Image (cartoon, rainbow, N blue to C red):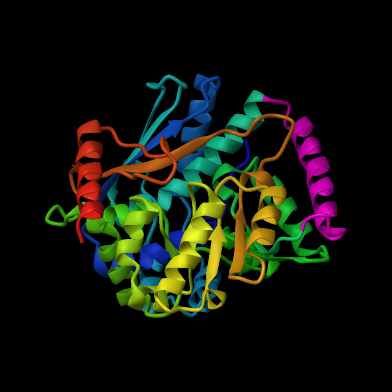
Amino acid sequence: MNQIINSLLEIDLYKFSMGQAIYHQFPSYITTWTFKCRNKDVKFTSEMVEEIKNQIKLYCDLRFTEEELDYLRKIKWFKHSYIDFLRLWQPRYEDFTITTDAECGLAIETNGTWLNTSMYEIPTLAIVNEVYFRMAYDYDDLLRSFNERLDAKTQKLIDGTYSLGAFSEFGLRRRLSAEAQELACNKLANSKFESSTFVGTSNVYLAKKFNLIPVGTMAHEWIMCVGQGNHKHNPAYSNWYSLDAWVTEYGVLNGTALTDTITTDCFLKDFQLTYATLFSGVRHDSGDPIEWGEKMIAHYEMLGIDAKTKTLLFSDSLDFERADKIKRHFEGRVKVAFGIGTYIANDTDENALNIVMKITFCNGQDVAKISDTPGKGMCKNPDYVDYLQRCITWRMEHK
């Protein structure tokens, strides 16, 4: 199989955004990441596992080119010290443990500095996806159905059936293949829509290639590690610690806060006037999007902030129809944007994989996410989840 990841820019932008803050503030943190396939009917063969190992070895041979570093340097919130670090950085295959010891036939863990392991998540998932779909199916048939569906959904944006406003492509981690994601981004970038605007992609490599805006700020790992990685911290205050560290790094730049790592209700305890003013918006990734949006608008209004000056970025399991309904609901009340992943990058006649790679330990201790949708978390220790939930509950019941 041809090499799947061909550039270290082939990663979501938020990995660089978090990476710079990790480099400057948390360079000694050690993390473990664990792969999980949530599809009950998927089986990785031993041949697939060997190909995944081979592809990850090829990925670990990559280095940033000066052209790539020059591109990153032009993004206004990246600092020269971090760019110089990336000039020296390389993935380490020694950080990976890949076996067949899992129900689905594939087990992957990475362990090492947070600086390193954070960077492995997205390329690893992209590799697993492409290996699986090329080896489990007739790939040409899948790509044919992908193109047919892409043409049909794009036409509905062209003729105004769906009105999304600003939307971006977020599908790298679950794409059918590098070829498919590039086809989708190229088509969306070169189409004229009646009432939708394709603004960019989370894939930095494709953003550079097609002169799109690279999109992405923070992920759950940021709140989990900053808030729970220091064992002296009360984890119910994870959002405060992570928001404070983000503002220390970026000030008013690069400011879209993720709300649901330890529930949005707990997030709002810390998202008070200073942070709500400094951050340009917030991102939805679990729970009912309409209820969440109404809650965020009410919170801004309670703080005396005009919600029309803020952006609600929706990114949870979206398709064009869902995005259209959300936009119509909030029309004129708040800025709305969408990050759409699997529906753009892996929509074929076969079901997409539901695979994730999550932080399970930070600095030798369990970490966990308790989102607005039950079951989205992934922690190996139920006692720690119980402890975290009790901390959140206590805080919610006290001022």
Tell me if residue 315 can be seen. Answer: no
- Between 300 and 1, the one lying in front of the other is 300
Identify the image quadrant of the N terminus: top right
Residue 352 location (% of width, % of height):
62, 34
With respect to residue 62, does 350 lie above or below? Answer: above
Residue 206 location (% of width, % of height):
64, 60
Q: Residue at x 41, y 80 (%)?
A: 252
Q: Quadrant of residue 208?
A: bottom right
Q: Is residue 180 magenta?
A: no
Identify the image quadrant of the C terminus: bottom left
- Between 307 and 31, the one lying in front of the other is 307
With respect to residue 233, does 254 lie above or below? Answer: below
The region drawn magenta spans 137-162
Q: Is residue 357 left or right of residue 229?
A: right
With respect to residue 180, does 272 lie above or below? Answer: below
Q: Residue furthest left?
A: 232
Residue 247 location (% of width, % of height):
34, 75
Q: Quadrant of residue 131?
A: top right
- Between 212 and 380, the one lying in front of the other is 380
Tell me if residue 53 can be seen. Answer: yes
Q: Main secondary structure of the magenta part?
A: helix
Q: Is residue 237 left or right of residue 145?
A: left
Q: Residue at x 29, y 69 (%)?
A: 245
Q: Is residue 63 left or right of residue 130?
A: left
Q: Residue furthest right?
A: 159
